[in-house]
Image (spheres, rainbow, N blue to C red):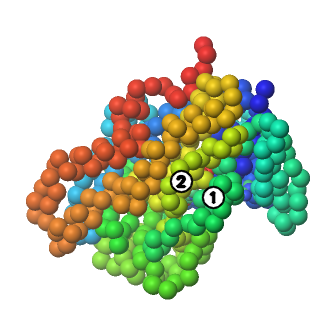
């Protein structure tokens, strides 16, 4: 019987632990923070991830605390519609797309761990400091929040699910730096009346100035909790930023969106109505693709393996899929190293491709094309971008991410349990 050490209790680590439990492989999750709190604003789970989370028995719980996304719509800075497409079940998937607060998603995963694996399955206040493979085992060493040694643990496999600043990844790629592209996101969350379908994700503007907006939860009285991201270029010479969420200058953000008042949504007022304490900032960082994730009995999943820019709502979904493909590989291969290689080989090329696609704006590239071809707006979008260009951009991105309707509907789960 193998025992697996998972480093990191974020979305990748917790969902992976649930998958390992489902296939009967014992594991324990270690996280650096003293307490796992439900942190973060909006995150999207595409139907490929919801399929897997449904196979873990969590589909209904997630639907109850999220929003079943109906459409994804792109507008230029004048508020003109460039492209809209149905999403989730409205697009013919067997599973929905769910826009959700990351905190709520985290809570659902943690509650399921506590119920199924027990509270002892997640160990907090344990920051991984080093590890080594010795005599067919992996030894992991931890420090407590004050930096003092917190002991060592032995396992058969170590999974690095420790996010964009992964210590496990650093062990294999020392000196590697996060790549900052000079843009800052402001993130906000605010209660407001529904807009468009009531479950619409909208992306507005162009590469240098854009906003992504979507509801993540129904509130009493017919209002919605609406998540937004606003992009701005940092003045040259500003210090590099690496922290996830830090307090932001709300007014500086709001001022940049003056005039973004459209018949379908008053973006400027939405931002202005957001309580200042709920506006955070983070740098647009990712990392270069790497050639290997799996080294003997150690591998990487989620942001530790493929940290990507938040384009096309991929990071959360792909983190879930990683854990599922890894669990399936562990069922298929007897030897740990062979299983980890199998998992890597199934995932790495597509995820490395996605990192680069997202740097090039992914499916949001149509915003930039519309801006370059018609900065003052258009009479008809087809004067600027053909239907074929629009359709193929959308479809190609979904195919690259493994979440086109055909691919998702083709199976019930990556993990096929014996009946
Ligand atoms: C606090 C926080 C807020 C976020 N908010 C959002 C959001 O609003 N929207 C969004 O789209 N994405 C958000 N993300 C990122 C998002 O969760 C990921 O991009 C995606 O879900 C992949 O998840 P992950 O588990 O790979 O990484 P993460 O969710 O980042 O989880 C990594 C985990 O590893 C732990 N960890 C790090 N280093 C160590 C170490 N040395 N030893 C042990 N544990 C370690 C961290 O404490 C964290 O719990 C947030 C991440 C964090 C950590």
Tell me the element at label 2. Answer: loop
In this rendering, is residue 107 above or below 335?
below
Q: Position of residue 239 (x, y in %)?
A: 56, 82
Q: Is residue 225 left or right of residue 28?
A: left
Q: Quadrant of ligand 1?
A: bottom right
Q: Position of residue 395 (x, y in %)?
A: 30, 43
Considering the image in quadrants, where does the C terminus appear? top right
* Earlier sequence position, callout 1 versus callout 2: 1
Residues 296 and 223: in front is 296
Q: From this viewpoint, is residue 331 visible?
A: yes
- Other residues around mark 2 within 10 Å, as few (<14) / some (14–19) / many (≥20): few
Q: Residue at x 47, y 50 (%)?
A: 352
Ligand 1 near label 2 (Cβ, under 8 Å)? no
Residues 157 and 415: in front is 157
What residue is shown with label 2? 290
Mark 1–mark 2 CB contact (< 8 Å): yes
In this rendering, is residue 237 above or below 248?
below
Q: Residue at x 36, y 60 (%)?
A: 361
Q: Residue at x 35, y 72 (%)?
A: 209
Ligand 1 near label 1 (Cβ, under 8 Å)? no
Q: From this viewpoint, is residue 107 visible?
A: no
Which label sits on residue 38?
A: none
Q: Residue at x 72, y 49 (%)?
A: 7
Q: Is residue 317 left or right of residue 233?
A: right
Q: Position of residue 151 (x, y in %)?
A: 89, 53
Tell me the element at label 1. Answer: loop
Which label sits on residue 173?
A: 1
Residues 99 and 159: in front is 159
Residue that sits furthest to the top in the current view: 419
Q: Position of residue 149 (x, y in %)?
A: 88, 60
């Amino acid at each position: 019987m193998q025992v697996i050490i998972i480093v990191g209790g974020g979305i990748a680590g917790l969902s992976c632990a649930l998958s390992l439990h489902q296939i009967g492989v014992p594991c324990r999750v270690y996280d650096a923070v003293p307490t796992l709190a439900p942190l973060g604003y909006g995150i999207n789970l595409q139907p490929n991830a919801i399929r897997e989370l449904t196979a873990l028995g969590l589909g209904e719980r997630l639907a109850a605390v999220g929003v079943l996304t109906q459409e994804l719509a792109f507008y230029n800075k004048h508020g003109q519609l460039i492209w809209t497409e149905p999403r989730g079940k409205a697009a013919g998937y067997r599973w929905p797309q769910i826009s959700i607060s990351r905190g709520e998603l985290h809570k659902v995963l943690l509650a399921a761990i506590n119920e199924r694996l027990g509270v002892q399955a997640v160990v907090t206040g344990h920051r991984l400091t080093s590890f080594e493979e010795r005599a067919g085992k992996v030894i992991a060493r931890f420090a407590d929040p004050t930096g003092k040694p917190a002991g060592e643990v032995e396992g058969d496999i170590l999974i690095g699910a420790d996010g964009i600043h992964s210590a496990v990844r650093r062990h294999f790629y020392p000196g590697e730096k996060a790549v900052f592209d000079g843009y800052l996101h402001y993130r906000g969350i605010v209660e407001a009346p529904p807009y468009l379908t009531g479950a619409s994700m909208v992306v507005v503007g162009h590469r240098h100035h854009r906003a992504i907006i979507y509801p993540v939860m129904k509130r009493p009285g017919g209002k919605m909790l609406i998540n937004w991201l606003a992009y701005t270029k940092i003045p040259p010479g500003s210090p590099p930023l690496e922290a996830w969420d830090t307090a932001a200058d709300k007014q500086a953000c709001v001022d940049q969106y003056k005039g973004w008042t459209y018949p379908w949504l008053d973006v400027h007022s939405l931002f202005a109505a957001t309580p200042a304490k709920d506006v955070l900032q983070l740098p647009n960082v990712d990392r270069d693709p790497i050639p290997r994730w799996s080294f003997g009995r150690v591998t990487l999943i989620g942001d530790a393996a493929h940290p990507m820019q938040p384009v096309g709502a991929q990071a959360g979904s792909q983190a879930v899929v990683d854990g599922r493909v890894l669990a399936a590989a562990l069922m298929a291969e007897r030897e740990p190293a062979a299983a980890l290689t199998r998992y890597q080989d199934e995932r790495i090329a597509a995820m490395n491709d996605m990192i680069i696609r997202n740097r090039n704006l992914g499916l949001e590239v149509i915003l930039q094309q519309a801006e370059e071809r018609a900065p003052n707006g258009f009479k008809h979008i087809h004067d600027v971008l053909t239907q074929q260009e629009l359709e193929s951009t959308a479809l190609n991105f979904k195919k690259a991410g493994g979440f086109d309707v055909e691919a998702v509907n083709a199976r019930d789960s990556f993990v096929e349990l014996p009946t």
